[in-house]
Amino acid sequence: MQRKIAHVSQSKPVMEGAGVRLKRAFGSNEVPRFDPFLLLDDFRSDNPKDYLKGFPWHPHRGIETITYVLSGDVEHGDSLGNKGTIGSGDVQWMTAGSGIIHQEMPKGDQNGRMHGFQLWANLPAAQKMVAPCYRDVTAAQIPEVSLDDDTRIKIICGQIGDTTGPVHDIVIEPQYLDVTVPAQTTYRHKTVKGHTVFAHVIGGQGCFSDNEETLFGDGQLVLFGDGDTLTATAGDASFKFLLISGKPLKEPVAWSGPIVMNTQKELKLAFDQYNKGTFIQSAT
């Protein structure tokens, strides 16, 4: 069954961290529409003043943060002593679990460009307090497949044909794809029925669904209704979008800032522990 368009939105400018200008595709106001996903931020800018102040030390608990960098570098470190840099084409999949305090400092490339995205995925109640961990994925580890119609797909997680992405064993069974459809070409994609599926357009123009003629462009987000297939048709130039899906948790969400739990009591406990210096529960 073909998935139809259920909801369309335009990314909105927001300021986060110590003064980072970015665009938010969706966030807390959209719960539970994108379940199991909570937030998608698009931090593409060619002006270092928009991002250099970065995201200094802050806590996370109860979620996973997925950072995908197209251009530039992001230096990161945490209270457990981990540190490093992810660069163009790299991904960091961080499971905050029981709690981590970290910082992310975008640096941009030699031309001042900093292009990337951060997605938040919720953790189920049974895994909210697992030990935090990282999955650092280099660009070289992310496979790219080219289909017969010249559609190109980078597979961060999930599977296209016989090719599987490098991120495995995530409870929400996510698929995270970077898709480029050639001009005036239609790409048909199989999806798991019952999963939440959305596309975030990051280049060119195109339409979704066989019976839909509306063109979507950069910064627009399209959420699909249920079904097992969807189509994307490019306009007069290549159509580029992130295609993301996952299994809904269907659990209550208690969310404040960087911490997402299931109840207000759990949320209060987390902030009380953070204020008392007992937030870190286990080592990576």
Image: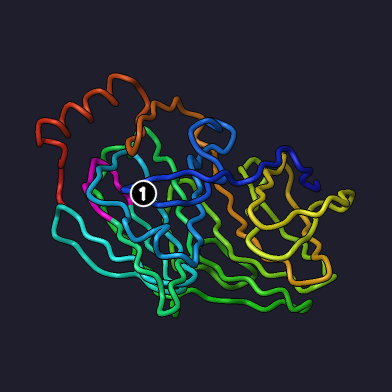
Q: In the rendered structure, does residue 92 fall within the stretch colored magenta?
A: no
For the residue marked with disc 1, what is the amino acid?
Gly
* Residue situated in front as seen by the camera: 16 or 252: 16
Residue at the spot 76% in from the left edge and 61% down from the top edge? 205
Coordinates of residue 69 in the picture (x, y in percent): 45, 66
Q: Residues within 10 Å of mark 1 (few under 14, many from 20)?
A: some
Q: Residue furthest left?
A: 277
Residue at the spot 29% in from the left edge and 66% down from the top edge? 75
In the rendered structure, the answer to whether residue 283 lies left or right of residue 72 reads left
Which residue in the structure is indicated by mark 1? Answer: 19
In the rendered structure, the answer to whether residue 66 lies left or right of residue 268 reads right
Residue at the spot 39% in from the left edge and 58% down from the top edge? 51
Establish if 213 lies above or below 224: below
In the rendered structure, the answer to whether residue 6 lies left or right of residue 68 reads right
Establish if 251 lies above or below 22: above
Coordinates of residue 23 in the picture (x, y in percent): 53, 49
Coordinates of residue 47 in the picture (x, y in percent): 46, 65
- Image coloring type: rainbow
What is the magenta range? 95-103
Q: On the image, which quarter does residue 160 sit in?
A: bottom right
Element marked by disc 1: loop
Q: On the image, which quarter does residue 4 sit in?
A: top right
Q: Quadrant of the C terminus?
A: bottom left
Count of numbered circles in the view: 1
* Residue situated in front as seen by the camera: 145 or 76: 76
Q: Residue furthest top?
A: 265
Coordinates of residue 119 in the picture (x, y in percent): 47, 50
